[in-house]
Image (cartoon, rainbow, N blue to C red):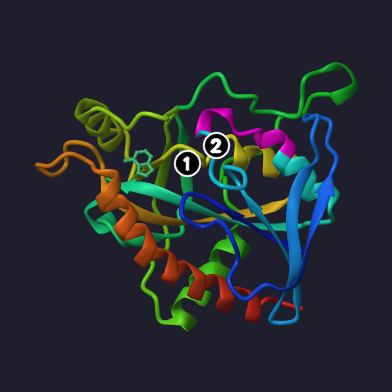
Amino acid sequence: MLAIIGGTGLYALEGLERSELRAVDTDYSEEAVLLRCGTLADREVCFLPRHGEGHTVPPHRINYRANIQALARAGVREVLAVNAVGGIHERMGPGALAVPDQIIDYSWGREHSFYQGGETGLDHIDFTSPYDEGLRQWLISAASGAGVPVWPGGVYACTQGPRLETAAEIRRLQRDGCDMVGMTGMPEAALAREADLAYASLALSVNWGAGLVDEDISMHAIRRVLDDGMQSVHRILREAIRAAPA
Ligand code: HPA
């Protein structure tokens, strides 16, 4: 089964039919994780809003382990994650979409692994290619089918947030080879790999990284880009689900 993880600006899956809330208990949360599961284009799909219903959980407090374990326990095998980002590469101006192929993780202090020794064991997952290549290609074809241009690659930098970066931090990310910056890509991608879920991201740029243009980053401007950009995201997701391999 396929799951969509929605980020900022994506709180429900358009066109999801016969949906019901499924409460999944996990080892990492007292409260069950709520998945909205239903059918879209005759496929069973579950939707999980990463920041909680009503966007109340900031990036550094998201219970990534509970979310990923809930998806795995619900029988999910593939995850398409949607991430709002700031653009660093010139191709990633506001409104641009990408299916990144690499990650650099600058976040800290997050519970980032299921492996804690003892009963939970220890393994070192291979993370050379942090995103599942099959799912990435599937998203890229879906975008092409939906007539929405996407950059079929790019390096995603994950910062801690919730504050935005300084101009010097963005210049450093640029020197490091990062093309876009968000706050929620990790540890989500690594936990998905640990849980043996295929995982890929569709990233929507909602602003230029700090200091790249001569204006402050305003939430007002971000919201405007989000509203438009999410229409493209919905189109790509619908096409991806429609064209899903049986
Ligand atoms: N930085 C980090 N995360 C973000 C940004 C940004 O500029 N825009 C959207 N998510």
Which is closer to the viewer, label 2 or label 1? 2
Gap in Å between the C-alphas at discs 2 and 1? 8 Å
Secondary structure under the numbered disc 1 in the rendered image = strand
Q: Outermost residue toward the left?
A: 214
Figure quarter occupied by ligand 1: top left
Asked if residue 47 is among those painted magenta in the image, a careful observer would answer no
Residue 48 horizontal side relative to residue 93, left or right = right
Dominant SS of magenta comes to: helix
Disc sitting over residue 148 in the figure: none
Q: Nearer the viewer, residue 31 or 148?
A: 31
Q: Magenta span covers which residues?
A: 59-66
Res 12 quadrant in image = bottom right
**Residue 61 among magenta residues:** yes
Left or right: 13 as drawn, with respect to 164: right
Q: Quadrant of the C terminus?
A: bottom right
Q: Nearer the viewer, residue 139 or 5?
A: 5
Quarter of the image containing the N terminus? bottom right
Image location of residue 79, percent across then percent down = 66, 56
State the residue at coordinates (73%, 51%): 197
Mark 1, residue position: 103
* Whether residue 104 is situated above or below residue 222 in the rendered picture: above
| Location of residue 41 in the rendering, given as x and y in whole percent from the top left corner | 69, 81
Q: Residue furthest right?
A: 119
* Residue 73 percent coordinates (x, y): 85, 48
Q: Residue 186: give its label.
A: 2
In the picture shown, does residue 119 fall above or below 57? Answer: above
Q: Amino acid at mark 1?
A: Ile
Tell me whether the residue at label 2 lies in contact with that at label 1, contact meaning CB atoms closer than 8 angstroms: yes
